[in-house]
Amino acid sequence: MSGSHEPLVFSGMQPTGNLHLGNYLGAIRNWLKLQQQYRCVYCVVDMHAITVDHDPKALAQATREVTAAYIASGIDPKTSIIFNQSQVAAHAELAWIFNCVARVGWLNRMTQFKEKAGKNREAMSVGLYTYPVLMAADILAYRATHVPVGDDQKQHVELARDIAQKFNNDFGVPDFFPAPEPIITGPATRVMSLRDGTAKMSKSDPSDNSRINLTDDADTIAQKFKRAKTDPHPLPEAEEELAARPEADNLISIYAAFAEKAKQAVLDEFKGAQFSTFKGALSELVVAKLSPIASEMRRLLADPAEIDRILRDGAEKARATAAPVMAEVRRVVGFVS
Ligand code: AQP
């Protein structure tokens, strides 16, 4: 537990396109378990989404879709706070203050920026560069102590810890912000592309065949698994043998996550099987788990006004939670009010 701070869980997802199986297994599914135990704040991070080129209409639609995915997956807006980031000004305000706390050297080490910018670094938005600072503000505006994320976000949560610590030290307010801990659990914390076992499954991959979207129908899911890249060997007996077979490892991990079994238990069942047999069983399992979510998402999206009402209600609760923290932050920093 983080110092004297009351436990609070914060996490978010970008409305940048189709949510996929990686977002679900790496993040949303773990959020459900946490909402039974802790106060939870689950955000649709629309301000992060504009760090890359975007279409305003598509952003609004994607914001509603992500909200629908949260609720359809089992996040209860009566228990957890669900809202979109742009509606709570504390995120932008604290991000500015943290921009003045974080060091350029720290941001230069962020691997996600390097991956997203590639050779085009100079042409990227300043927002994409300072993305992890906004993420630190998202977390710390609520003094969140736990952040359930996929493996790719670990470095960003560590940066939030560094920013919290430096703020506390610089302003002589020990324990003002907690050191938030990443929660990265389950057998599928980094789901890989179905076309390349060494690349992360991602919303922004131009190939739709690289991912299973939460809204894909049964046929599409079966087709995508059928076409998924594999190697020519049958499934191995021991988990260690998966280390050199990234595509096999990925498919076994997805099965293990949905079946709630260890990877070795899945291999005990399928050792020696051809991929064609295993892929059939995998499709069936994934369809059984995802189709109720997809149909609930469709039901919710038929009433966008209700989704907007849930977001407004959540934003009001989020503002009320962040307000006392921000009042103290302004005083600590020396802003006259
Ligand atoms: N492939 C993945 N495996 C496990 N977890 C994943 N997450 C993302 N991809 C995987 C987790 O999902 C949460 C939300 O991610 P995000 O929307 O903030 O953006 P991202 O991490 O950049 O995800 P994408 O899908 O790759 O989006 P784009 O392509 O738009 O950048 C996070 O907890 C993340 O760890």
Image (cartoon, rainbow, N blue to C red):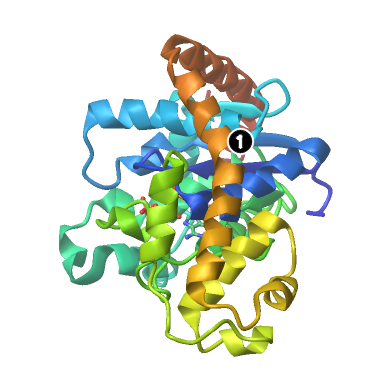
- Tell me if the residue at label 1 has its CB under 8 Å from ligand 1: no
Mark 1 crowdedness (10 Å alpha carbons): few <14, some 14-19, many ≥20: many
In the foreground, 30 or 123: 30
Q: Is residue 159 visible?
A: no
In the foreground, 26 or 38: 26
Residue visible at 25% across and 26% down in the picture:
57
Q: Is residue 153 above or below residue 298?
A: below
| Residue 105 image-quadrant placement | bottom left
Looking at the picture, which amino acid does disc 1 mark?
Ser
- Total of numbered circles in the picture? 1
**Percent of width and height locating residue 299:** 50, 19
Q: Is residue 71 above or below residue 150?
A: above
Q: Is residue 26 left or right of residue 14?
A: right
Q: Is residue 148 above or below residue 200?
A: above
Residue visible at 68% across and 61% down in the picture:
186
| Residue 65 image-quadrant placement | top left
In the foreground, 154 or 177: 154
Residue bearing mark 1: 73
Q: Is residue 11 left or right of residue 265?
A: left
Residue visible at 35% across and 60% down in the picture:
210
Q: Quadrant of the N terminus?
A: bottom right
**Percent of width and height locating residue 168:** 65, 54
Q: Is residue 12 visible?
A: yes
**Percent of width and height locating residue 263:** 69, 72
Residue visible at 23% across and 39% down in the picture:
54
**Percent of width and height locating residue 181:** 69, 58
